[in-house]
Image: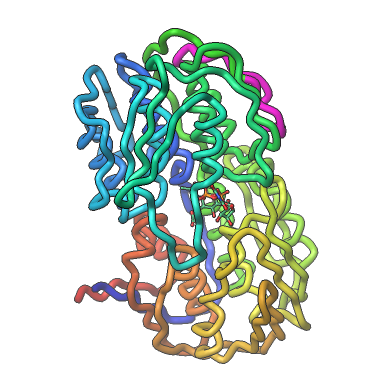
């Protein structure tokens, strides 16, 4: 397994291009199953999770061609000959559950392996299943698989009210409702930019959708969807991660393609910590206002709140802030696994339930650390860039799921980073 070697080396300066969003692309790709006509995604990120979704769609009968060095994904689901999403692929990533809605909506039946728990929490899919039941689907759980059928071969419109916000369940219900008979209203819907992007793409394919980006989405089902070409929205988590570089190391970094509307709550916290974020014509320019940043408290929430996917990276910044910060994780029950690794680098962190108290130290020290999940791995790289000496992050396969060409992008702003192949 590869490792990443990072050396702390002072201020970072330059520009970093931000890719299309992993989590948008992973929900846009299954939309191809809703139509017999081609769906082409541009600005796709080059990531291992996208390759796994490609493999899953191909196993169902879709054609997926990666073009322009992976930036364009040309998909066509003229035929869907297999309606079973096999455990061997599903176990690799949880987004695979997003093929269930489209398969059910298109052909009225599907069998999808239940994704397991994962390092950051149990992550059940009960809300997805309840949404399909509300739309008339009959579900049975057998041998680790969800067997789903729509009586008469077609889902029907329904009022779906989620007890709490779920990004994935909102996406699955939205995908399925486009071809259901009648009107579907999703209440307490997630408002993430990735949901808005999905609705825009589905509308390009001919779907009738209103209210995306608010808590109530209304979908008028249609008989068929056509083809479309759609650019994937900018990855706000990759954006936020790289915005932290000058905050942690000093210098000035401009993130190309970045927009304030994607990272509002996060930029507000940076501002309070003493980091300036300015929107330019081509992105977001970030620099530290003074020397050391100030401690700030952070609570993770669904969009437009502070994203859970930036909590680990923000913790890396706060490890060297002036004062004590409290981070509260409200989305996942076990998302502080980076804390003990940061402690190995000299951070002072006390985790108690869903809270982590971080008392800033002057300087972190390089150490051998282990990546436990995607966002944790990049937080250790950020910490390593600010530390004295060398940091070796092992188990970096997590990183390749969500950050494309990470070494190249970081070296472009002057970071000392290299991959050690096993
Ligand atoms: N939940 C349930 N039942 C469900 C669905 C969710 O209890 O049926 C719970 C989850 O266990 C969690 C909370 O609800 O505690 C919110 O989960 P949500 O469904 O919103 O998350 P998700 O759709 O599984 C997506 C992203 C995650 C991101 C979360 C929250 C994708 C592929 N994944 O997951 O991204 O953290 O939304 O914003 O879109 C990452 O990129 O590192 C990542 C983990």
Q: Quadrant of the N terminus?
A: bottom left
| Picture quadrant where residue 192 is located | top right
> Horizontal and vertical percent for residue 97?
40, 42
Q: Is residue 93 left or right of residue 24?
A: left
Residue 130 location, x and y as percent? Answer: 55, 38
Residue 378 falls left or right of residue 127: left
Task: In the rendered view, tell whether residue 112 sits above or below residue 49.
Answer: above
The quadrant the C terminus occupies is bottom left
Stretch of the chain drawn in magenta: 205-218
Q: Is residue 242 magenta?
A: no
Residue closer to the observer: 2 or 366: 2
User: At 54% across and 60% down in the image, what residue appears?
Assistant: 241
Say if the magenta span includes residue 211. Answer: yes
The total number of labels drawn is 0
Residue at x 71%, y 68% (from the top left corner) = 328
Residue 169 place in picture, x, y as percent: 54, 40
């Amino acid at each position: 397994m590869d490792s990443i070697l990072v050396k702390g080396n002072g201020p970072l300066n330059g520009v970093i291009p931000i890719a299309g969003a992993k989590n948008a692309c992973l929900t846009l790709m299954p939309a191809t199953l809703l139509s017999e006509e081609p769906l082409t995604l541009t600005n796709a990120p080059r990531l291992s999770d996208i390759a796994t979704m490609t493999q899953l769609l191909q196993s169902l009968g879709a054609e997926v061609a990666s073009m322009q060095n992976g930036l364009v994904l040309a998909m066509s689901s003229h035929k869907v000959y297999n309606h079973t999403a096999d455990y061997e692929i599903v176990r690799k990533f949880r987004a695979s559950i997003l093929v269930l809605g489209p398969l059910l909506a298109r052909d009225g039946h599907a069998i999808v392996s239940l994704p397991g728990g994962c390092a950051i929490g149990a992550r059940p899919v009960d809300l997805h299943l309840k949404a399909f039941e509300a739309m008339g689907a009959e579900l049975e759980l057998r041998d680790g698989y969800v067997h789903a059928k729509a009586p008469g071969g077609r889902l029907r419109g329904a009022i779906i009210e989620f007890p709490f916000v779920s990004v994935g369940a909102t996406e699955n219900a939205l995908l399925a409702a486009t071809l259901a008979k009648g009107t579907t209203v999703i209440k307490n819907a997630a408002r993430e930019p990735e949901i808005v992007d999905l609705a825009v793409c589905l509308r390009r394919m001919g779907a009738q959708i209103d209210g995306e980006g608010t808590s109530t989405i209304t979908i008028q089902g249609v008989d068929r969807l056509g083809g479309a070409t759609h650019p994937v929205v900018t990855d706000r988590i990759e954006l936020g991660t790289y915005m932290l570089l000058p905050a942690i190391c000093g210098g000035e970094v401009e993130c190309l393609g970045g927009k304030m509307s994607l990272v509002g709550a996060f930029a507000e916290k940076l501002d309070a910590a003493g980091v300036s974020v300015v929107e330019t014509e081509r992105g977001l320019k970030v620099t530290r206002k003074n020397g050391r940043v100030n401690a700030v408290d952070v609570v993770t929430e669904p969009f437009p709140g502070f994203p859970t996917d930036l909590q680990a990276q923000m913790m890396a910044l706060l490890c060297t802030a002036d004062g004590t910060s409290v981070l509260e994780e409200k989305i996942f029950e076990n998302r502080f696994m980076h804390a003990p690794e940061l402690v190995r680098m000299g951070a002072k962190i006390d985790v108690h339930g869903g809270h982590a108290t971080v008392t800033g130290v002057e300087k972190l020290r390089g150490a051998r650390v282990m990546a436990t999940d995607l966002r944790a791995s990049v937080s250790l790289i950020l910490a390593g860039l600010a530390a004295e000496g060398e940091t070796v992050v092992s188990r970096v396969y997590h990183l390749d799921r969500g950050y494309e060409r990470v070494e190249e992008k970081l070296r472009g702003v002057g970071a000392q980073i290299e991959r050690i192949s096993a």
